[in-house]
Amino acid sequence: MIKTDILIVGAGPVGLFTVFEAGLLKLKCHIVDILPQVGGQLSEIYPKKPIYDIPGYPSVLAGDLVDNLMEQIAPFKPTFTLGEKADEIKKIDDKLYQMTTDRGTVIQAPVIAIAGGLGCFTPRKPPIEGIEHYEPNGVDYMVRDPEKYRDKTLVIAGGGDSALDWTIELCDIAKKISLVHRRASFRGALDSVDKVMALAQAGKIDLITEAQAVGLKGDSGLSHVTVKTKHDTDPKDIQADYFIPLFGLTPKLGPIAEWGLNISRGAIEVNTEDYSTNVPGIYAIGDINTYPGKLKLILCGFHEGTLMVQSAFKYIYPDQKLSFKYTTVSGVNAFE
């Protein structure tokens, strides 16, 4: 039996930073995550991808951000259950929940903070016949290690931030990159769009818009991607060592969907005053929640976690006065 003050479901950056904010209020945290390591999507999907919108870091690799967060929360000694899925939840008394994982680990806490990112996520696959045949050797739905593509010929498909960012990052690593997008305009960040357009104008990448990848070819592995454009009658085969379709992730809440929470379009509805759900003592922070004006940014999740722990303290200790202190004055050691 594990007992803690706040049970955090999700060991991504938002869940990790919440441990820090809770530690400042002397609240202990235990984190459960289905992945075998901390970091969530940052570790699982793009540990080598630079992130540009973390305050104080002009650029930081996703994996390095996770390492820094772990160093930051170390003084508060959080505990972890990794490689296990948050499964059943039941209320023990008025202010105590008990969660059991799919492997039988039991955790009790008065407060649960759901920070599961996109929940159980799976990549959106393009409707290309026989694509599964090339998944072991030629088709990647995410970029884990850029060095894998050094001096290789790539076809990247997509029009969002991931497709744009990886086209930019891999441009100086890969031998050749063709970026295929079904529309003439992109939905990613304007700065990234400008950079991709500049690369195309300089002849550093092939930009193929109003087009779709419709087929894959190759014997022992991928050799060509068949692309059909809006204005050409016949599809064209483009040589490729790797095809990287980046169409985002399909979120699945899993067992969380059965916990009696108000859910809208696969996300948990929250009150923006403290990111509480409709169930007392259960909060949702980060990409897994939804509210008017929601932005799925790490820094927004940090803000949500910060306000959440303030509310959690009042929920756990309604008769105790909460004294807010600045770390610049007291330092972290004063909160341990």
Image (spheres, rainbow, N blue to C red):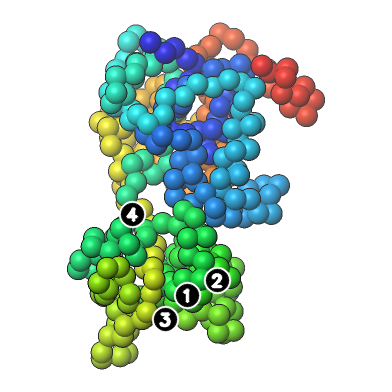
Whichever of labels 2 and 4 marks the residue nearer the N terminus, that label is: 4
Can residue 183 be seen in this snapshot?
A: no
- 135 or 207: which is nearer to us? 135
- 264 or 203: which is nearer to us? 203
Query: What is the CA distance from the residue labelled 2 to the residue labelled 4?
Result: 23 Å
Q: Are marks 2 and 1 in contact (CB under 8 Å)?
A: yes
Residue appearing at x 37%, y 58% in the figure = 141
As drawn, the label of residue 171 is: 2
Residue appearing at x 34%, y 18% in the figure = 105
Q: Are marks 1 and 3 in contact (CB under 8 Å)?
A: no
Q: Quadrant of residue 91?
A: top left
Amino acid type at image mark 4: Pro
Vertical position of residue 294 compared to residue 111: above or below: below
Residue appearing at x 50%, y 39% in the figure = 39
Amino acid type at image mark 1: Ile
As drawn, the label of residue 177 is: 1
Query: What is the CA distance from the residue labelled 2 to the residue labelled 1?
Result: 7 Å
Disc 1 crowd, CA 10 A, few/some/many (<14, 14-19, 20+):
many
Quarter of the image that includes the C terminus = top right
Whichever of labels 1 and 3 marks the residue nearer the N terminus, that label is: 1
Query: What is the CA distance from the residue labelled 1 to the residue labelled 3?
Result: 11 Å
Element type at marker 1? strand
Q: Nearer the viewer, mark 2 or mark 4?
A: 2
Q: Quadrant of residue 214?
A: bottom left
Residue 332 in the image, given as x and y percentages of width and height: 71, 23
Amino acid type at image mark 2: Cys
Q: Is residue 25 left or right of residue 187?
A: right
Q: Nearer the viewer, mark 2 or mark 3?
A: 2
Q: Is residue 95 left or right of residue 212?
A: right
Q: Are marks 1 and 4 in contact (CB under 8 Å)?
A: no
Identify the residue position indicated by label 4 in the image: 123
